[in-house]
């Protein structure tokens, strides 16, 4: 069936995405390919006797139990480290079939970036990123399920414009062919293999959800082996321990949390537990003998979470963070690692994400979730931008060989903020006297203002620009610090607003500012401006009218942020430095300012409260970015080695800015920007 890249919850088959899963037993040379519904990110296991699984979900029902006697309790599943694998796919794809072939992956079908179904079959080396085309399926498809049966790769159902009953097979040397039909059209399904029998789970026939679980040993004849307690589309499914686990999925009433277990021997289906949130379009993977559910769609956004599911108890625990919120990926496990191929975030992806068991501090961070999403760091002393996840994996950097620096070089990036729903970044290069916008993740230069390396006050010039923000109307505001003014600049590079008009560099509102270094956009359209000289924080309208002003008892106010109706957070850029929450009247409500020890801050320049309630800080001259729990006054996460500058992985050099991109590609710490 044809589905647009953005998933909808409506039951109409033309608007809902699908997920699929492929399973293969150990064997020699790959003989055929199976199409798997990628929308729920199904994953395949290479273990002999059983494989990956198909999607499913449901609500807790009377009489369900929490554990199956067929499982033996084990030690907790290790968290997973998630990172973007080497290389990119030739083109974005979502909902493909992905199967293991030795240590390679085979990719079949799926949707391209225009929402068109594909018939291509490809081989991917996930380590090197090398990819080659193997052939084509008889029919283009997506949202199908796949399995390896009798040495052939079999594709079950799926569709293009409508759900189909076709069963296709592909084999090197003999090409592709239609080998049979399902009892009825079905898309949005997944497959799992147990003991040589393949089970097709979940799905949609164009009108109704399909509760029946079909079993086949040859791919041409089918029997009903079980019936789901709650019929679902797009669930995460995997086979483990001789049982089939169906996590989440989309029911008629919406996304569900239930974890269903199918016993292939008896046909009995029970609900053994619940996911932490309603979830569909996720992937199920068996890695190292443990079951994980990754990504997917919640009711409001793409998820970047990885959960471990204990099939013995139904217990679900945090197990890591993906580099981005994503769903609709094809998935398979090879060589002790799991791979998510393509998928969707806000659009189709051309990346491959690798999942490996984490250990040490990476495991602690992966399981702890200090933030959800990706953290952008302006690594000022190293003249670069880095993107990291909570497991401290570098996901992206700028400049890079694929994304060279802009004209005039890339020097001293003081701040960097995501713009345009995560598709771009704006950064001010303080000592290079310019502002640059680049595309993300391409790194393509989109816009510049100022003359790199040349300071000035004339039109088109800046002198130590700080805190450049894109406003919702497309204009840009920047604190032009050594010109003692805040400018509002149009995309056409015309200055249409200025606060601090006389250039006297003293706090004398509304005409003069004393060395401004912050200009945060507020919900009411005004700007929150900090002035170094005199330690002032003030709110101005964009036309220069002063709303209020307060003197703070700190040495060097830096980058104030509004966190409540009359509550503001600011960093004191000093050694030892501190963080302060205050009111417009100057009352200090909370502070963090250790004078010594590992918690002491050395010139912190930006502090923001994360959606988790934790506070993220770039601790400039300690060469680190830290996250602090304000309730315990303890650092709970750190990137960079304290007071140890460097360029190697895990090291920073005077980081001076950061930004959080949430899984749904919003910027929760500065929601009033463009």
Image (tube, helix red, strand yellow):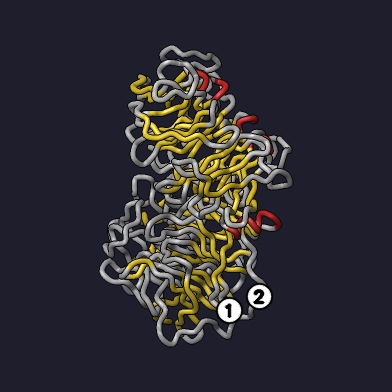
Residue pictured at 43% horizontal, 33% vertical: 549
In the rendered image, residue 265, in percent from the top left (x then y), is placed at 51, 85
Name the image quarter holding residue 189. bottom left
Name the image quarter holding residue 308. bottom right
Residue pictured at 48% horizontal, 45% vertical: 661
Which residue occupies the foreground of this view, 623 or 132? 623
The quarter of the image holding the N terminus is bottom left
Q: How many labels does the image show?
A: 2
Q: Can residue 335 be seen in this view?
A: no
- As measured in the structure, the alpha-carbon distance from the residue carrying label 1 to the one carrying label 2 is 8 Å
In the rendered image, residue 125, in percent from the top left (x then y), is placed at 59, 49
**Which residue matches tag 2?**
74
Question: Which numbered disc, 1 or 2, marks the residue that appears first in the sequence?
Answer: 2
Q: How crowded is mark 2: few (under 14 residues within 10 Å), some or many (20 or more)?
A: few
Q: Label 1's element?
A: loop
Residue pictured at 55% horizontal, 44% vertical: 580
Which residue occupies the foreground of this view, 410 or 594? 594
In the rendered image, residue 399, in percent from the top left (x then y), is placed at 57, 30
Which residue occupies the foreground of this view, 663 or 147? 663
Q: Is residue 407 left or right of residue 492?
A: right
Residue pictured at 25% horizontal, 69% vertical: 207
Q: Is residue 648 left or right of residue 116?
A: right
Is 238 situated above or below 447?
below
Q: Is residue 284 visible?
A: yes
**Which residue matches tag 1?**
312
Is 200 situated above or below 96?
below
Which residue occupies the foreground of this view, 54 or 447? 447
């Amino acid at each position: 069936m044809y589905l647009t890249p953005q998933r909808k919850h409506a039951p109409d088959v033309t608007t809902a995405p699908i997920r699929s899963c492929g399973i293969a037993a150990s064997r020699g040379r790959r003989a055929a390919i199976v199409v798997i519904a990628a929308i729920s990110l199904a994953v395949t296991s290479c273990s002999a006797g059983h494989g990956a699984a198909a999607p499913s979900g449901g609500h807790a029902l009377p009489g369900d139990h929490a554990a199956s006697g067929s499982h033996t309790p084990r030690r907790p599943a290790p968290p997973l480290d998630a990172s973007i694998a080497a290389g990119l796919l030739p083109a974005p794809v979502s909902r493909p079939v992905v199967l293991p072939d030795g240590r390679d992956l085979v990719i079949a079908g799926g949707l391209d970036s225009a929402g068109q179904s594909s018939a291509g079959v490809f081989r991917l080396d996930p380590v090197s990123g090398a990819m080659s085309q193997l052939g084509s399926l008889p029919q283009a498809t997506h949202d199908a399920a796949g399995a390896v049966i009798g040495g052939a790769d079999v594709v079950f159902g799926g569709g293009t414009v409508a759900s189909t009953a076709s069963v296709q097979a592909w084999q090197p040397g003999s090409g592709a062919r239609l080998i049979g039909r399902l009892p009825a059209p079905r898309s949005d399904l997944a497959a799992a293999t147990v003991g040589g029998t393949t089970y097709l789970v979940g799905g949609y026939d164009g009108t109704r959800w399909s509760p029946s679980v079909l079993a086949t040993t040859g791919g041409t004849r089918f029997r009903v082996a079980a019936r789901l307690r709650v019929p679902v589309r797009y669930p995460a499914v995997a086979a483990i321990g001789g049982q089939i686990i169906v996590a989440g999925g989309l029911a008629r009433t919406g996304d569900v949390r239930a974890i269903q277990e199918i016993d292939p021997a008896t046909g009995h289906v029970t609900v053994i537990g619940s996911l932490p949130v309603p979830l569909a379009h996720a992937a199920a993977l068996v890695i190292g003998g443990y079951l994980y559910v990754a990504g997917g769609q919640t009711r409001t956004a793409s998820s970047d979470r990885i959960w471990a599911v204990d099939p013995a108890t139904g217990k679900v625990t945090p197990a890591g963070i993906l580099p981005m919120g994503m769903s609709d990926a094809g998935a398979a496990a090879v060589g002790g690692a799991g791979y998510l191929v393509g998928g969707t975030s806000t659009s189709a992806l051309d990346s491959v994400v690798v999942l490996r068991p984490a250990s040490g501090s990476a495991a602690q961070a992966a399981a702890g979730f200090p933030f959800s999403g990706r953290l952008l760091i302006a690594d000022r002393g190293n003249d670069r931008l880095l993107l990291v996840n909570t497991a401290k994996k570098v996901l992206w950097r700028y400049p890079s060989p694929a994304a060279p620096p802009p004209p005039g070089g890339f020097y001293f990036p003081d701040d960097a903020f995501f713009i345009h729903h995560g598709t771009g970044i704006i950064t001010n290069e303080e000592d290079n006297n310019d502002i640059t916008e680049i595309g993300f993740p391409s790194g393509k230069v989109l816009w510049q203002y100022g003359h790199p390396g040349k300071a000035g006050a004339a039109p088109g010039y800046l002198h130590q620009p700080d805190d450049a923000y894109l406003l919702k109307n497309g204009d840009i505001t920047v604190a032009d610090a050594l010109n003692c003014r805040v400018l509002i600049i149009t995309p056409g590079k015309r200055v249409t607003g200025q606060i601090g008009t006389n250039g006297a560099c003293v706090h004398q509102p509304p005409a003069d500012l004393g060395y401004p270094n912050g200009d945060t956009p507020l919900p009411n359209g005004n700007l929150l401006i900090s002035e170094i000289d005199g330690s002032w924080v003030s709110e101005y309208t964009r036309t220069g009218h002063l709303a209020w002003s307060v003197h703070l008892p700190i040495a060097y106010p830096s980058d104030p942020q509004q966190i409540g109706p009359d509550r503001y957070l600011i960093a004191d850029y000093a050694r030892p430095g501190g963080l302060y929450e205050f009111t417009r009247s100057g009352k200090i409500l909370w502070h963090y300012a250790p004078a010594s020890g590992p918690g002491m801050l050395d010139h912190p320049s930006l502090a923001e409260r994360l959606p988790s309630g934790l506070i993220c800080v770039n601790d400039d001259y300690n060469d680190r970015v830290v996250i602090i729990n304000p309730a315990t006054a303890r650092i709970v996460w750190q990137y960079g080695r304290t007071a140890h500058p460097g360029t190697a992985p895990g090291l920073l050099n005077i980081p001076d800015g950061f930004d959080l991109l949430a899984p749904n590609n919003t910027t929760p710490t500065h929601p009033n920007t463009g």
